[in-house]
Amino acid sequence: MNLQRRQLIEGGIFLIGFAACIPLANYMIGHVGTVCVPNGPCLIPVAPGLTAPSGVLLVGLALVLRDLVQRRLGLMWAIGAIIVGAFLSTTFTPPSLALASAAAFLSSELADLVVFTPLQKKGLVRAAFFSSIAGLVVDSVMFLWLAFGSLDFLAGQVVGKAIMVVAALPILFWIRNRDRRLGLMPA
């Protein structure tokens, strides 16, 4: 398989994964957790003494996948994915959370893009890590404030999303090393 075809196929896989994370995260917030707060989110433990809305895990993964979409398909595809993702973020969520979800998603993914774009020239792993951290902080603050008028779960949100970013690091190292071996350059 030639490198261009490989790049398109992998980019498509990352794009599908990114798109799937968004409605699944919103579904989880309202339906999956160890405890569901009345008129609030379903929570999961993310660290000793810390809980977060359950969708945080998939939001953290989505930030990394968006970086990989950009790496494989290019900046315009990443921007398109963010726009479609903002629309998707309104699905599987109560109307009261739709605006908060879309605004937080759009802002966090744009923050991720702004950090990732210049850093990717210095390396995939570093760029994805720092851009995802920027995006997850923006997402956490905006979503909690807009959706619930409170930052009560901020620490848990940040930790929960960071868990997925850190869990993705070995895969990012593997992709980086394989790209070097194959001579596959960012789009």
Image (cartoon, rainbow, N blue to C red):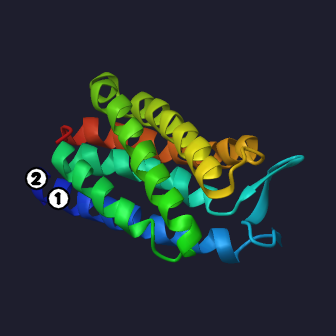
Q: Which mark is residue 187?
A: none
Against 96, is 124 above or below? Answer: above
Tell me what residue is drawn at x 65 percent, y 68 percent: 29
The residue identified by callout 1 is 8
Between 86 and 28, the residue placed more toward the observer is: 86
Q: Is residue 166 visible?
A: no
Tell me what residue is drawn at x 51 percent, y 54 percent: 61
Residue 149: percent from left, percent from top: 68, 50
Q: Amino acid at mark 1?
A: Leu
Between 156 and 99, the residue placed more toward the observer is: 99
Q: Amino acid at mark 2?
A: Gln
Quarter of the figure that contains the C terminus = top left
Q: Residues within 10 Å of mark 1 (few under 14, many from 20)?
A: some
Per the image, label 1 sits on a secondary structure element best described as: helix
Between 9 and 65, the residue placed more toward the observer is: 65
Per the image, label 2 sits on a secondary structure element best described as: helix
| The quadrant where residue 94 appears | bottom right
Q: Is residue 124 visible?
A: yes
Image side of residue 54 versus residue 90, left or right: right
The residue identified by callout 2 is 4
Residue 174: percent from left, percent from top: 42, 43
Q: Residues within 10 Å of mark 2 (few under 14, many from 20)?
A: few
Tell me what residue is drawn at x 29 percent, y 51 percent: 69
Tell me whether the residue at label 1 lies in contact with that at label 2, contact meaning CB atoms closer than 8 angstroms.
Answer: yes
